Amino acid sequence: MSALFEILISASFWAAVIRIASPLVLATMGELICERAGVLNLGIEGIMVIGAFTGWLAVYQGMPLWGGVAVAMSAGMLFGLLHAMLTVPFGLSQHVVGLGVTLLATSTSSFAYRLALPEVTSPPKIEPFQPLDLPVLSDLPFMGEVFFTQTAFTWFAFGTALLVALILFRTPLGLAVRAAGENPSAVEAQGLSVTGLRMGAVIVGSGLMAMGGAFLTLSAFSSFFFEMVNGRGWICVALVVFGAWMPSKAVLGAILFAAFDALQIRLQQTPLGAELPYQVFLMAPYVLSILALILMSRRAEVPAALMTPYNKGER
Amino acid sequence: MRLEPISSPSLARQLGLPAAALGATVLLASLLAMLAGANPFAVLGQIVTGAAGSKFALLETLNRATPLIFTGLAVAVAFRAKLWNIGAEAQLYAGAIIAVLLGTGAIPAPFVLPVTAAVAMLAGALVLLGPVLLKTRLGVDEVVTTLLFNFIMLLFVSYLLEGPMKDPMGMGWPKSEALLKEARLPRIAEGLRLHWGFVLALIAAVVVYIIERRTTFGFEMRTVGANLNAARFAGVPVNRVLIQTALLSGGLAALAGWSEVAGLKGHLSQDLSPGFGYTGIIVAMLALLNPLAVIGTAIFVAGIFVGSDAMSRAAGVPTYIADMLLASALLFMVLAILLTKVRVVRG
Amino acid sequence: MTASDVRAGDIVLRLDNITKRFCALTANAGVSLDLKRGEVVALLGENGAGKTTLMNILFGHYQADEGRVEVFGQSLPPGNPRAALAAGVGMVHQHFTLADNLSVLDNITLGTESLWSRGKGRAAARVRIATLSSKFGLAVHPDARVGSLSVGERQRVEILKALYRDARILILDEPTAVLTPQETDALFETLRKAIALGLSIIFISHKLHEVMAIANRCIVLRHGKVVGEVDTHATDRATLAALMVGSDVALPKAGTKIPGPVLMRLRRISTKAKGTATGLSDLSLDLCAGQIVGLAGVSGNGQAALADLISGLTKPDQGQIAIAGQDPGPWSPRQALHHQIARIPEDRHKTGTISDFNLTENAVLEVYSRAPFSRYGWMNWPAAEGFAKDIIAKYDVRCQGLAQRIRLLSGGNMQKLILGRVLEPGPKIILANQPVRGLDVGAIAYVHSRLIAARDAGAAVLLISEDLDEIQSLSDVIHVISEGRLSPGFARGTRTAAELGFWMAGQGFKDNSHAA
């Protein structure tokens, strides 16, 4: 028990929590935008992979780190465009298209990786984002380590979440996106294009997901390997539900989730970790996500038109 | 733009569009081959000969198709009832675990095959029962839960293979003990590298077809999938049907793992399935969820994989081309099928 | 010419030779129409005559195949609702285009500011909404969630949406279908204020007395064509009715019958509200053999809850159901079918049929699990086909054969198949929920005659309809439902429409809360 307590009061633990939460925050915001507009985007897992890969490849080929982030975002938006084309104007099953996009994006990453680096056996590393060394702030006890030794990408992730929240709830654009997910015919009747809004949301959301993936290669692991996203995308889908489609609650969910993840890594080093097989700890994130879904199942804040395609002909 | 239903689509439309989808996939294959610096015609040729150019290649394709028929059927029945079972991978491993657990001496020889098969199906069914009960009782979306179960199951298998089920003779490799000879599916003919699992997969497809078309349960399953509201209104016991469908689906997916262990590998390892559960979705969708067509699409998909492996060795194009082609074929095909039913009109 | 310098009597809107085809169906064939400033033109026609399609073209939801639309002398680009809104055309849709989870303010301001702006005008928007509300008599709270509003209030929001955008031309699509007679009067008051302020109105309806009350001119559509244009001062209801229908259709005479024993008894039943749908509150009702009970009421007042209850889709939270004096056991759709309740659902496309299934499969949808259709878990398809064939012959379902998918049938034929499906087993109790909605005159007469015949054969019929005329002409006893409460039963001909409207508006219940 004291081991647990020691972990929970250590600054390095909370610094890790913020770090682990960052990619989840970005990708969860991406999924949240899509779902707020009425589109379930199950392409998230693959789009995170393509983001992780393209971001890494761009930097490996000599681009600056933020250039890599931009490349990742563009690649994600491209796959978002594919998803949006098929699910919005054509109204195809969002389940099937989402899984198809995930399979396509994942295999494209693997194919391109092999094409770009046919010979390598161990994944090459890049120089990742470095912790920001802020004068005074970084030297603060505890808080300094938790908040002010993070990389710029982490700040960017949390800043993005704030921006998403502001746009969704404080601007005419956000109102229109939310209305598209609640009742598309209300949007159409006010002279706005449901197709445009939904496609835009899916494309922008996919860009965020890809940047979440890029965080893994550019800020966390500094190299790309297959299976590195490892279900994080699906976890983000669960986090959107857990956050009841609210950006603030979803960010809290991501932090909570990251805390459990950071905790399980550290618990593996304790006597408890020696007793239990390490797989039990690795399972924790997935089990936790399922529990979160169960916990939130009775709530009914789901956007009313989620997964309902809109076709002008059917009024 | 707007979509307008076509009341009676022409035959040309019904056949031409799926053909165009296949054509687009072939075109993409050529482009990817050129991207990899290879001759597209050579690459396409090598895929075809690699998949079906010799007896050996063909048998390899059919071997690879066997688990895909099972997982394809599992997905097809579930999707037919609009039960989004994306967890065939987990159910497959459940079947594989049972095959090892009961096939290494626990069951007396004469019964071992039927018993392991039955228990494997039960185990797969139970794995899907959790998510489906969460769906029917609490309204938890099954897509995410079944997906997450895949990761949990893989870690569970990893634990088993490094712990209680680890083969003491395995030189430290995380794999299980080998199955007893009686617990293994024999080859169809002496010297033919194809096991009875393939025949069982064909039988399973026919059985599932009969269930869907001829039984009361099959009718109920189709009503639930085609229009949930109308099914509920007409007195179809929707939740019971969803649970039964899940049991069938999970059982079929488990047979994939069972037949891979009992027919092909002879033991359980962590790389038993290179994503057969996920590929089953492609197989089922390409077959338009028709159980008999699953046989054909599974062999086609297996051929692409086997052919790409062979092509990759010869032409140096990464073998992941197969996954790319299949994922695109899936997207092309769902679009083509939609366009056989609707036309795009302005305004 | 712009909206501001139009004088009274000038033409503000011109539809010129509009033609619109959907596959084989011609919804509008060369329709032309003029609207002057300060005028109310009624667009009159049966269901399916092409009124709504025409207005959707004007508003830009659809694109016409031929013809053009001119607003204030300017040609409108086709298929562009934004252009129509900008030109001063506002549409009040029959099915409100409101997002339930958003506030009134959000719904009204949606799309009125540039999507790329910061959007600062919320305080100003509030003031403007308040001004419009008082000017046109449309009281509604701007911060209320639309989902919590009554149907009448939602309509006010829908009208405010148009006025907020400075609409000079208002199109109202069947606006009174969801209102009590009293609420309709209030709406007309609002419309008169709008006309006085120089707006012009197109009023779509199939209710003749309303058209006579509000419109200056009346244009009658039939099968997508204009078949008549008359000044309302120079005509009468009979002339309009003849124009609308084309030929005289003999309405079935309901007659009367002495009621038999109570077949279904609902005692003090309450159910919870489902989402925005009203629940039932302490409702008691008897359905007797050989009697048609009509349920009148404004839509959304618990009709759906009562229909769901009788169908078996919901269980009562409080109170009892008795069938022929007995407790029917755990209540479910299958139980309702077991007790010989025939259910004609409100929405034949979404609940009544499975559109991708063929006629045979749809015909046996409610009986598939019984012998001879199902034996030992196997379907007996030949028996099912025999059953379907019988229905098709007896109920005159026009189709291409049993293997045809049901979505290819017309609404009338689909309804006949449903009628056959539920009446053929010889039910004791019939729930007919909006059984003629969207049907043409011939099909309406057919459905009504079948219901009367079933009553004469001894069935207890509950007819739910929002059309008071239909209720009054068919029912032996009329109940009014309001906010989930039921009025006492009124025998045929003992109450006028206005008196029923009084109950529909929720008055009179305080003294009679337990009467039935």
Image (cartoon, rainbow, N blue to C red):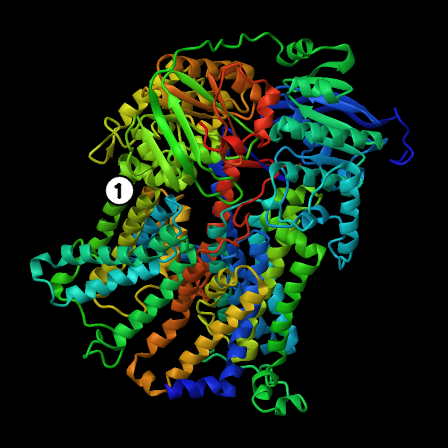
At 51% across and 67% down in the image, what residue appears?
A49
Residue C423: percent from left, percent from top = 36, 20
Q: Is residue B69 above or below residue C7?
A: below
Which residue position is annotated with label 1?
B206
| Crowdedness near tag 1: few (<14), some (14–19) or many (≥20) residues, C-alpha within 10 Å | some
Subunit that carries the residue with mark 1: B
Quarter residue C184 falls in: top right
Find the residue positioned furthest to the front: C511
Left or right of residue A141, residue C88 in this image: right
Instruction: Kindly tell me whether residue C231 is visible in this rendering.
Output: no
- Of residue A105 and residue C407, the one placed in the foreground of this image is C407
Quarter residue C62 falls in: top right
At 40% across and 12% down in the image, what residue appears?
C453
- Quadrant of the image containing the C terminus of chain A: top right
Q: Name which residue type carries label 1.
A: Val
Q: In this view, does A72 lie above or below C151?
A: below
Residue A175: percent from left, percent from top = 67, 54
Instruction: Kindly tell me whether residue A3 is visible in this rendering.
Output: yes
Left or right of residue C257, residue A28 in this image: right
